[in-house]
Image (spheres, coloured by chain):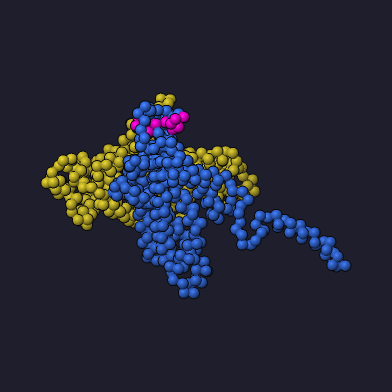
Amino acid sequence: MSGNLLKNTLLPPRVKLQGQVLAEPSAGSKFQPRLPRHIPLAIVVPLLVIALIAVCALAPGWIAPFAPTDMDDNAILSAPSFHHLFGTDAFGRDIFSLVIFGAQRSLEIAVFSMVFSSIVGTSIGLVSGFSGGWIDMALMRLIDIWMSVPPMLLALIIAAALGGSFDAIIAAIGSMTLPPFARVIRSQVIAVKARPFVAASQALGASPLRVMLQHVLPHILSQFLVLATLGLGQAILVGATLSFIGLGVIDDRPDWGYLLSQGRDYISDAWWYATFPGLAITALAVSVNLLGDTLKSRFDPHHQKR
Amino acid sequence: MPEMAFLVRRLAGAVFVIFGAITLVFLVLYWLPGNPAAMVAGDGASNATIADVQAQLGTGRPLLVQYGSYLWSLAHGNLGTSFATGEPVSSRIWAQLPPSLELTFCSAVLVVFLGVTLGVLSAVYQDRWLDRTIQSGVMFLTSMPDFWLGVLLILVFSVKFHLLPAMGSGSFRQLILPVACLGLKFGGYLERMVRGSVTDVLHDPFVTTLRGKGLREFSILFRHVLRNALIPVITLFGVLVGQLISGVVVIETVFARQGLGRLVVDALGTKDIPVLQGVVLFASAFYVLFNLLIDLSYVWIDRRARL
């Protein structure tokens, strides 16, 4: 009797519950990573733009209709047409091709400076947050001093001091993106350090380096990713600014900032010269920043609350 | 007197940071490649002339001696003499200061106006079309290089419609485009901060309490929410001013204006170390003291912060 009742009243809801559970996307195996059902446009579009620019940077010769050194005497400062999509410059060079070849230099500068400042910044943040005491104190005062010089001024002086080479630009951009990196990573490390598993691994006799790299670092990876992406957006802009002011690397592969500075001189005769390189910088920076914002709202618990 | 002790501690901190910045910039400039004496002596100068100039400028002495004499003259209020023109650095800075200050101040006003107005609108209409429009606009503005925005403004307003002058400084009409450029760009940054902060405060329980008490939405927003929301924004505004100074340097180049930015770019080209040191010292001191004032203003804005 009671068994019957159980069958009638309890079973149907349970079946229904199971049905619902099965409909959930993540019900398969416990160990499968959760994949979102659809990837939002705010990730797809920026990724596509970045991929396109990366292809331009990796194989400019495949896409560009002309070589960056090709000069056409019959088409000096000619407006955009089917033959020259973005018009030509004062030497009759095709601006569309120049922009495609410029992608290489611009991306190179942005990525290398970000790798540099994220490695150095994270190391400073890790050491400072993990060791505490006078080391932390000294490193943070150094960062304070560093940040007390208006950022672009310091970058200008470093770029000039080391003299228009690739390394100089990397160091100059790094001088702007590095300090915030160190600060944020430090505060994250201090938060993670207080958690019991760190004390547990220390009690097991793990060396500080091992604790730092194997236990603390993985917990700040999401923050690291957000910082690196947003820093990359900044690096793109700073790199372009340095070239625009005339402190960039100048050879036969001019980057977008340099093209823009050239275009600025012909602004009253050739609107296309400055417009298209600027459009390229903006497209790349908007994409990287959008991606950074999306990552931030994914990973930042403060954001998720809303 | 806890306020007094706080003030003294913060002032000492500020002085320490400025001193550090002087040292940092001194070291970087010391490593500037190229012999400044050769630049001053001019092209084709003989080795003997260069040696003479070097002795005169004192650039051949060891690092510590140069550093010591630099600090010594700084302590006497002397910023040094420009390598390029032979004028005192302080008078070159004073001459170029007014146009830069004018540009910085007007832009800052526009930044605050745009940032706060749009930020509040965006937070109140969160996720509606108005918010989305403002957010996408801000995304573009903040990701654009500021010099490109300047170039676009020149293209539209000077080249195409001949409404405003593209270059030079001095008149009000020449100020409009550079101010619009900086105001739009940095107003965008501030807008995001204001939006985030106001959204946070709007979700605080005390807002529900106020609504429950029957206060009008208008007075909740302006008398209670904004007051609480602006405190973190003011700190961030201090950081933004540093970026604004950087922006001024770049924008002065784009619009071919007189000012400190022009001075810096010229000095970089001629390896005019005393001028660079002077400008960086001036800008850092301004930036650090501005942020100190902001810290102190908390005591006045938020009584809980007293100490």
Q: Residue furthest left?
A: B48
Determine if the magenta segment contains residue A83: yes
Image height of B162 relative to A29, above or below: above
Which chain gets the yellow colouring? B
Which residue occupies 61% across, 48% down?
A38
Q: Position of residue A192 (x, y in %)?
A: 50, 63
Which residue occupies 27% across, 47% down?
B277
Q: Position of residue B24 (x, y in %)?
A: 30, 54
Q: Position of residue A87 (x, y in %)?
A: 42, 31
Query: Could one spot residue B183 in this view of the protein?
Result: no
Nearer-the-camera pick, A221 or B199: A221
Please give the range of residues in magenta.
A82-93
Which residue occupies 15% across, 42% down?
B45
Majority secondary structure of the magenta segment?
A: loop
**Quarter of the image holding residue A12?**
bottom right
Which residue occupies 34% across, 32% down?
A91
